[in-house]
């Protein structure tokens, strides 16, 4: 089964921060005018600045703003979630994974939990952790059973997991065949060595039983010695 790159779909923090939007490989956003109401709270100001940087695809600057917001208000849901997305865009998937796990485990809002698990699944996909991705997408669907993108990504993760298992089984079979071939070659070589050993032993035994060889060769007589023997 081949799935398109639609599986790369990512979501950002929903609700009053900004409307949920998706990314394919790049950012492919829906209208995001639904910012949270203007506030002079420093953590919200930093988060809003981070969102602006994110929209410009300046993800390192967005990351810095989200971290400033979290310095001012630890575990602020919007900043925590969007920090995960910002580091994901920088391909720092293990860091993104921690951010989405934190949101999924601590945020009571089912919509937010669903999107956090969805994005968590995507971080696992990028790391080829197919089994973990399947688990994350299933958790997302427990919070929102109608999300088509999550269902699609779950199907993709399951397909890749099955492919990996099949590839591993084929590799194991090839390794077994290689081992069998090595065993057969070793047995052939052992038999050759044993046959040679037996041949050598038989040759030695034959030499011992040969009286000519056993007594050794008679010394050669000179012409003079032979004539003396005849005259005697």
Image (spheres, grey):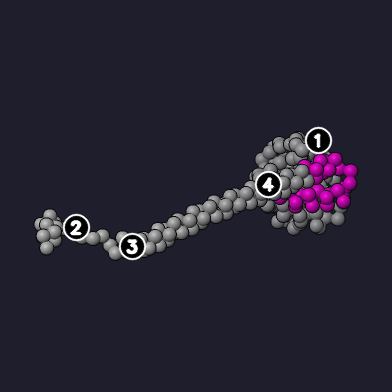
Whether residue 164 is in magenta: the answer is no
Of badges 4 and 1, the one in the foreground is: 4
Going from N to C along the chain, the mark reached first, 4 or 3, is 4
For the N terminus, the image quarter is: top right
Residue 30's tag is 1
Taking the spot 66% from the left edge, 50% from the top edge, the residue there is 172
Going from N to C along the chain, the mark reached first, 2 or 4, is 4
Q: Looking at this view, is 32 or 179 the one in front?
A: 179
Q: Is residue 88 left or right of residue 146?
A: left
User: In this picture, which residue range is highlighted in magenta?
Assistant: 128-157
Q: Looking at this view, is 162 or 82 the one in front?
A: 162
Residue 35 appears in the figure: no
Going from N to C along the chain, the mark reached first, 3 or 2, is 3
Mark 2 neighbour class, 10 Å CA radius: few under 14, some 14 to 19, many 20 or more: few
Of badges 1 and 3, the one in the foreground is: 3
When asked about the image quadrant of residue 73, the answer is bottom right
Q: Looking at this view, is 196 or 81 the one in front?
A: 196
Describe the element under mark 3 as helix, strand or loop. helix
Question: Pointer 1 and pointer 3: residues touching (CB < 8 Å)?
Answer: no
Q: How many marks?
A: 4
Whether residue 151 is in magenta: the answer is yes
Residue 211's tag is 3
Mark 1 neighbour class, 10 Å CA radius: few under 14, some 14 to 19, many 20 or more: few
Mark 4 neighbour class, 10 Å CA radius: few under 14, some 14 to 19, many 20 or more: few
Residue 58 appears in the figure: yes
Taking the spot 51% from the left edge, 56% from the top edge, the residue there is 190
Residue topped by disc 4: 170
Describe the element under mark 1 as helix, strand or loop. loop
For the C terminus, the image quarter is: bottom left
Question: Pointer 4 and pointer 3: residues touching (CB < 8 Å)?
Answer: no
Going from N to C along the chain, the mark reached first, 4 or 1, is 1
């Amino acid at each position: 089964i081949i799935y398109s790159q639609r599986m790369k779909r990512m979501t950002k923090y929903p609700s009053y921060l900004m409307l949920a939007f998706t990314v394919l490989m790049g950012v492919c956003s829906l209208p995001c005018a639904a910012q949270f109401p203007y506030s002079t709270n420093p953590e919200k100001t930093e988060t809003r600045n981070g969102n602006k940087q994110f929209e410009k695809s300046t993800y390192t600057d967005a990351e810095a703003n989200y971290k400033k917001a979290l310095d001012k208000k630890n575990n602020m849901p919007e900043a925590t979630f969007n920090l995960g997305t910002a580091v994901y865009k920088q391909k720092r998937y293990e860091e993104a994974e921690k951010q989405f796990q934190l949101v999924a485990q601590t945020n009571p809002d089912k919509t937010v939990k669903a999107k956090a698990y969805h994005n968590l699944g995507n971080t696992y996909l990028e790391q080829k952790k197919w089994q973990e991705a399947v688990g994350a997408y299933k958790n997302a669907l427990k919070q929102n059973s109608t999300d088509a993108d999550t269902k699609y990504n779950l199907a993709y993760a399951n397909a890749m997991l099955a492919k990996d298992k099949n590839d591993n089984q084929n590799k194991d079979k090839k390794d077994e065949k290689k081992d069998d071939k090595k065993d057969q070659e070793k047995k052939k070589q052992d038999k050759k060595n044993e046959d040679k050993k037996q041949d050598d032993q038989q040759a030695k035994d034959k030499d011992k039983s040969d009286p000519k060889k056993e007594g050794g060769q008679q010394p050669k007589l000179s012409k003079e010695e032979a004539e003396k023997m005849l005259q005697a």
